[in-house]
Image: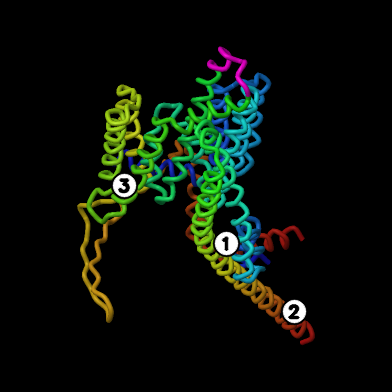
Amino acid sequence: MLNEDRIKIMTELAMFEQGSGKKKLKISGYYRRDYVGLNMITTTLWVLLGYILILLLLGVVFLTQVLAALTIANVIKFIIISLVGFAALLIVYLKMARAHFSRKHRIAKRDVKEYYGKLRGLGRLYAREKAMSAKTTDDAGLGGEQ
Amino acid sequence: MKNLLVFREQLKKFYGNNSMFIDRAFRFLFALIAFWAINHSIGFMTSLSNPLILVGLALICMFLPVNATVLISAALILANLYKLSIEIMAVTGAIMLIMFILYFRFVPKQAFVLILTPIACALKIPYVIPVALGLAATPISMVSVGCGVIIYYIIHYATVYAAGVSASTDTDAVSKVTYFAQNVLQNKQMWVTVMAFAIVVAVVYAIRRQSIDHSWSIAIVVGILLNFVIFVIGNIVLNVKVDYAMLIFGSILSLLIALALQLFLFTVDYSRTKYVQYEDDEYYYYVKAVPKISIAAPEKKVKRISHRYGSQMEENREYMTEKNDEELEKEIEDSLNTKYYNNK
């Protein structure tokens, strides 16, 4: 028999599983610290790549000035400034990444908890229906005997 | 105003009934316009300029998320620039990669602004983008719109550069890269536009969040005026080239589009504002409640003129609505039983 409540829950569950749930189920499989830590490492690598690209672009734009001022002292100065710049950028990005991925993990956990709650509700609905159908069968059986 | 609100409700209802098709149609149109605009401005690769290929790509994008359109657009830009010069493609690719790595990795939902801004620039209504983002998004969109402007100027400069390259082809790779990167990244007009759009996003957002009456309308007007003033200052102080006719025309058009957008995002009745004051153990609350304007879309009534068929249907319908399901089921069962026993 069709049960409207059950269909509603099943639709919500299917929408979650086929939509944002795919990613969220995966994220919620990690501990928060592991998930954030892993993404902070990835962010460090991406920021490093981005920073190298920015330096290369700036080098290309100011190529003539760079070539004109190419001395050992300037190279050392450039390396120090670049490292300080990278450290500053990395600190900003790591703070942002920690906040961003912590929030993402928290939301994923919350939604997955809600999803499991609905799954349990669906299980209870099935159990109740099964019990009711068993009861009606028993009643019908008893009636037949009488 | 009432007619506009009714129209809005009708549109909402229509969208609600056909959202799946409308979403796909919009994705297709967005992709097609983006690919057409790219091809129109920097269509150096003739094999990609075939309209059938563009339509085919747009059809594919119809079934993919919006960010797929952004990636395909980026690939199209790079492919066309490759035909122009591999060095220019490398510089553009590096700029795009920096944007994706350092920004769009964290806010992938705003990647569409990267393509929407150049499209709006090509359609001469760029000023609507920062105002719309200030109204509908958060201040982080300042970066998105800035990236969009940079992409537009790269495309724009590539067309200018194409003429220069054809005039002098004997330049080496390094000087080509330096020349292109210098002209794109040291372009004062581009940086003035980036600054103007970023400020407009922030100001529009700040004003529309205020609890003052007509905050959204004020935000739109102030945003457009501020944009105008920044461009005028840029023209006077930094000697940036500004086409005043286009600036005024674009501003008026953007104002109208932003006001239309407001109709869909925020319509309230300030005349019925209520002020409530109460307290709990920790705070005093001064609440301002502004009611939303909601008008039900009028429903079309179909009156049947054909007497026999129509009246019979009406009678049946009335009868069905009067009875509840159980009663109807019982009646049907009774009639079937009667028929069965009669036949027997």
Question: Is A142 placed above or below B275 here?
Answer: below
**In the current view of this chain or complex, which residue is farthest to the top?**
B167
Q: In the figure, B339 relative to B80: above or below?
A: below
Dot 1 corresponds to which residue? Answer: B328
Callout 1: chain: B
| Element class at badge 1 | helix
Along the line of sight, the residue nearer the viewer: B161 or B64: B161
* Nearest the eye: B334 or B11: B11
Badges 3 and 2: C-beta atoms under 8 Å apart? no
Bounds of the magenta segment: B163-172
Q: Which residue is mark 2?
A: A137
Q: Residue at x 59, y 21 (%)?
A: B43
Question: Residue A1 occupies which quadrant of the picture?
Answer: bottom right
**Percent coordinates x, y for residue B69 in the rendering:** 59, 38
Quick one: label 2, few (<14), some, or many (20+) residues within 10 Å? few
Kind of residue at badge 2: Thr
* Image label count: 3
Q: Residue furthest front?
A: A72
- Residue B205 tag number: none
The disc numbered 2 marks a residue on which chain? A
